[in-house]
Amino acid sequence: MNDWLIGLALAFTVATATVAVLTRDPAKQAVVLSALGLGLAVLFAVLQAPDVALSQLAVGTALTPLLILLTVRKISRHRAPDEHDEEQR
């Protein structure tokens, strides 16, 4: 049972890491990065490292994606209108 659970957590982590690499939009990538952090936290918990799992849960699932989303929002707000129009073409 334990090996099956480790394999499932590892497969989820690999799948979300692949999706995070292939995602081009930074806002969507932050959401996928949050899922990756959750997968890593579950993997650490299954591997009996609860302190590392809690740290990963706080930093990888909540803090890092939040900082990325806030950065993307601030950059898009300070971008000049003509620059934004040229990038959409």
Image: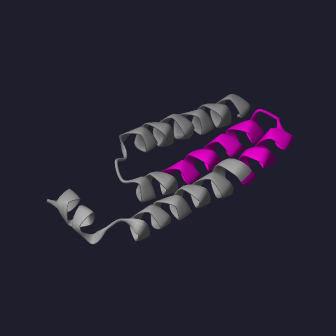
Residue 79 rendering spot, x and y as whole percentages: 36, 65
Residue segment shown in magenta:
32-58
Residue 18 rendering spot, x and y as whole percentages: 43, 37
Farthest residue, direction top: 3
Residue 22 vs residue 68: left or right? Answer: left
Q: Residue sitting at 18 percent across and 60 percent down?
A: 86
Residue 29 vs residue 1: left or right? Answer: left
Query: Can you tell which quarter of the image residue 46 is in?
Result: top right
Q: Main secondary structure of the magenta part?
A: helix
Q: Residue sitting at 80 percent across and 39 percent down?
A: 52
Farthest residue, direction left: 89
User: In the depicted view, which residue is nearer to us: 10 or 63?
Assistant: 63
Residue 21 rendering spot, x and y as whole percentages: 42, 38
Q: Residue sitting at 54 percent across and 40 percent down?
A: 12
Query: Can you tell which quarter of the image residue 66 is in?
Result: bottom right
User: In the depicted view, which residue is nearer to us: 67 or 76?
Assistant: 76
User: In the depicted view, which residue is nearer to us: 73 or 48?
Assistant: 73
**Whether residue 33 is situated above or below residue 71 in the rendered picture:** above
Residue 60 lies within the magenta run: no
**Whether residue 34 is situated above or below residue 49 in the rendered picture:** below
